[in-house]
Image: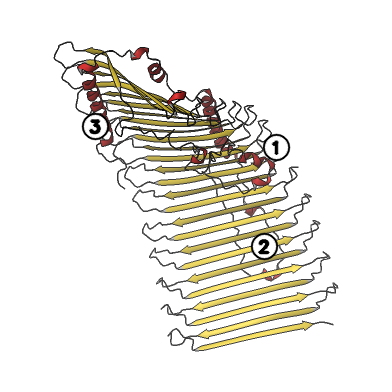
């Protein structure tokens, strides 16, 4: 396995640092020009103070929303942790009277020991939540503003979409800014030198402080005094050159803007925006490898499209990026970045904010020994949105998503010793806004990779998934619908040689319906499966493969404790290659199913049926050409509609097919097939057989010269019907 953190220089940071240094030097050259020495008094300028003096913020609503987001994430994890694993289907046997099966190979038990531990993905709900009245609230997540601004949660990749262009609001920025008559500059910057210190008088100042202001306004109707577009920008930065050698070591600055758009030029702003950028950079030893770079941004944009003085939509974007390279060797010891997006809708345009959404991402890496290999790296992402139409603090609908990935490389050799990925998602509906959730979904996914020997070959990879869903429309704590699923996959390479010895997969799922919410389930379903692949000889060929699955379903619509319908099925597949040469010596497959009907729920079945099938292939000389392949199937069913113990009819069938390649050259020499179907009727209900019918089929074929063409074929079909008086 290649090292995940290869030792390379980080040109992006170096380029950014050089640009920052160049900007500082260019600005100093400008402000030192004799014509720009006159003070402009920007400190007292109201526009300048408004731009630089305050930082855009999303307001108190974000703090509450972030708290709710973390609470929802905790609730999602709690819900998946508390989800009760469905019982094993093998614990619910289906008893079927099937005398003709007595001499056949018994069906596999199908018992599964599938387990899944609590862990932190998407949930595919089994319930049709749209049939639940509360689901209509979800449609209100699509805001009803003067013009549709789009679904704020359209896709996973665009959870928080901006207003669409159809609403007259550009998706990415407030407006396309382009000077009318100047292709090179939007506006003319005016600078003032606030302070300058050149203690040794060598013309290379040790300190400068510069302010600047740039104003651009577009007004197609100057007479009304209401510009259609206004953009005002300001700058304030300081630079230090303590050794006075002409190279600035420290730069601290910020730039901001305020802007508005008034397309109809009536003095009422449809769009307003404010933003502030901050930059701090230190390169004490002047090697063009900054020891510290910090960059921050905050911007807010608000929309009042109908010009009634009430903001219908507002969005905020904040970002922070920090890089620390204390020893200035070009390899950062710590890199940290975060981005936050928040937006809110006032659906009723009445000054309240019914909808809020937030997304936060945080990334951090640590390379304490500065060797280019991070000892730790982490990525965290959180997204949450809520709709609270009556503003009582209890959202009628909300959903959230959380993702975290971390990697640890304790000895800093570029190969992580542990990698962990966690994801959790949840949603709920509370249409009556009483704080009790009527519909809930939650899911969690965890991936763990462990490489204790640190050789690039993980000893264990484990994937675990847990999901649940429930609907409790009347809030009586008896869900009308509930479902849960658990799954886990383990991949083991115990000796860490890069060859997997064992792969295990387990899954179990269950669901039930309690339509009248009385605690007695009308319908239940269970499913369990497991698979194992063993490679004990540790080559490219597994020695043993095993797959088992079992399912069970029962219905009790009148809730009397006697099931009117029961269905069950099981499957088992196994293959063995003891010498691991890529050719299985024995392959077997078995399947079993049964169905019982007790329509009047009196404990006496009106119908029972069962079927069992088995396939086996043997390759004794282990050359990939089985000498014997045999398939068998047997089934039986009957009906006793009046439940008097005398069956109105019975059906039985048996099938056996065998193909022989005795010299194992890949050409089948002999084929035999036998099938029997029997139908019996007892219509007079006196216990005597009224009629019997059967069909017997016998087929034989041989290819004596083994040229692929049958030299001998024989088919016998015997049909018989017998009616008793």
Residue in view at x 50 percent, y 45 percent: 464
- Residue 546 left/right relative to 481: left
- Residue 630 left/right relative to 372: right
Q: Secondary structure at mark 3?
A: loop
Q: Secondary structure at mark 1?
A: loop
Q: Residues within 10 Å of mark 2 (few under 14, many from 20)?
A: many
Work out how far the residue at label 1 is from the one at label 3, CA to CA, in angstroms.
60 Å
Residue 394, relative to residue 608: is it above or below? above
> How far from the left and from the top, in percent, is residue 70?
52, 31
Residue in view at x 48 percent, y 55 percent: 532
Q: Nearer the viewer, residue 151 or 296?
A: 151
Q: Quadrant of residue 83?
A: top right
Q: Residues within 10 Å of mark 1 (few under 14, many from 20)?
A: some
Work out how far the residue at label 1 is from the one at label 2, CA to CA, in angstroms.
34 Å
Label disc, if present, on residue 594 of the rendered structure:
2
Mark 1 near mark 3, Cβ–Cβ under 8 Å? Answer: no
Q: Secondary structure at mark 2?
A: strand
Question: Is residue 119 among the parts visible in the rendering?
Answer: no
Question: Is residue 550 among the parts visible in the rendering?
Answer: yes
> How far from the left and from the top, in percent, is residue 282?
26, 23
Label disc, if present, on residue 330 of the rendered structure:
3
Q: Nearer the viewer, mark 1 or mark 2?
A: 1
Q: Earlier in the sequence, mark 3 or mark 2?
A: 3
Q: Nearer the viewer, residue 709 or 66?
A: 66
Mark 1 near mark 2, Cβ–Cβ under 8 Å? Answer: no
Label disc, if present, on residue 477 of the rendered structure:
1
């Amino acid at each position: 396995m290649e090292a995940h953190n290869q030792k390379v220089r980080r040109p992006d940071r170096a380029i950014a640092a050089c640009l920052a240094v160049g900007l500082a030097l260019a600005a100093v050259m400008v402000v030192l020009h004799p014509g720009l020495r006159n003070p402009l008094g920007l400190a007292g300028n109201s526009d300048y103070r408004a731009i630089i003096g305050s930082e855009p913020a999303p307001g108190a609503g974000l703090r509450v929303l972030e708290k709710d987001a973390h609470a929802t994430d905790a609730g999602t994890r709690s819900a998946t942790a508390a989800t009760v694993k469905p019982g094993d289907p093998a614990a619910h046997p289906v008893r079927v009277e099937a005398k003709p099966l007595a001499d056949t190979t018994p069906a596999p038990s199908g018992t599964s020991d599938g387990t899944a531990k609590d862990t932190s993905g998407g949930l595919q709900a089994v319930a049709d939540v749209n049939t639940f009245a509360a689901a209509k609230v979800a449609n209100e997540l699509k805001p009803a503003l003067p013009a549709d601004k789009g679904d704020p949660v359209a896709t996973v990749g665009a959870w928080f979409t901006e207003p669409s262009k159809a609403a007259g609001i550009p998706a990415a920025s407030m407006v396309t800014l382009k000077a009318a008559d100047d292709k090179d500059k939007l506006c003319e910057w005016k600078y003032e030198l606030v302070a300058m210190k050149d203690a040794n008088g060598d013309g290379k100042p040790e300190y400068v402080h510069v302010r600047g202001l740039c104003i651009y306004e577009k007004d197609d109707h100057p007479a009304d005094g209401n510009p259609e577009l206004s953009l005002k920008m300001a700058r304030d930065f300081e630079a230090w050159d303590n050794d006075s050698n002409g190279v600035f070591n420290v730069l601290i600055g910020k730039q901001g803007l305020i802007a508005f758009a008034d397309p109809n030029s009536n003095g009422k702003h449809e769009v307003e925006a404010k933003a502030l950028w901050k930059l701090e950079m230190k390169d004490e030893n002047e090697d063009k490898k900054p020891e510290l770079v910090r960059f921050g941004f905050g911007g807010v944009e608000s929309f009042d499209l109908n010009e009634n003085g009430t903001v219908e939509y507002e969005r905020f974007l904040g970002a922070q990026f920090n890089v620390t390279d204390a020893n200035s060797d070009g390899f950062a010891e710590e890199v940290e970045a975060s981005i936050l997006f928040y937006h809110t809708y006032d659906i009723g345009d009445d000054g309240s904010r019914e909808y809020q959404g937030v997304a936060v991402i945080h990334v951090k890496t640590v390379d304490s020994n500065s060797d280019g290999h991070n000892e730790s790296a982490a990525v965290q992402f959180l997204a949450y949105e809520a709709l609270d139409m009556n503003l009582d603090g209890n959202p009628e609908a909300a959903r959230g998503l959380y993702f975290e990935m971390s990697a640890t490389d304790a000895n800093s050799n570029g190969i992580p010793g542990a990698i962990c990925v966690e994801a959790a998602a949840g949603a709920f509906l509370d249409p009556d806004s009483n704080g009790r959730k009527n519909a809930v979904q939650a899911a969690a996914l965890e991936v763990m990779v462990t490489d204790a020997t640190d050789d690039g070959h993980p000893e264990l990879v484990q994937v675990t998934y847990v999901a649940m869903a429930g609907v409790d429309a009347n809030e009586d704590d008896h869900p009308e619908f509930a479902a849960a699923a658990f799954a886990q996959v383990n991949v083991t390479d115990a000796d860490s040689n890069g060859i997997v010895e064992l792969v295990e997969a387990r899954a179990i799922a269950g669901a039930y319906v309690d339509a009248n919410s009385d605690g007695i389930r009308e319908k239940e379903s269970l499913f369990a499966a497991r698979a194992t692949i063993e490679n004990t000889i540790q080559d490219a060929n597994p020695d043993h493969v095993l797959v088992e699955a079992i399912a069970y379903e029962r219905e009790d619509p009148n809730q009397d404790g006697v099931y009117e319908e029961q269905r069950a099925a099981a499957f088992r597949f196994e293959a063995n290659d003891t010498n691991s040469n890529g050719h299985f010596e024995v392959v077997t497959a078995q399947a079993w199913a049964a169905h019982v009907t007790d329509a009047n729920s009196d404990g006496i079945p009106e119908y029972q049926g069962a079927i069992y099938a088995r396939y086996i292939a043997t390759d004794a000389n282990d050359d990939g050409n089985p000498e014997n392949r045999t398939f068998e199937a047997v089934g039986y069913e009957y009906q006793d509609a009046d439940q008097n113990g005398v069956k109105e009819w019975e059906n039985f069938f048996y099938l056996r097919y065998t193909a022989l390649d005795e010299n194992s050259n890949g050409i089948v020499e002999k084929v035999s097939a036998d099938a029997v179907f029997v139908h019996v009727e007892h219509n007079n209900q006196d216990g005597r057989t009224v009629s019997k019918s059967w069909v017997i089929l016998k087929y034989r074929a041989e290819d004596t010269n083994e040229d692929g063409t049958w030299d001998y074929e024989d088919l016998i079909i015997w049909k018989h019907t017998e009616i008793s008086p």
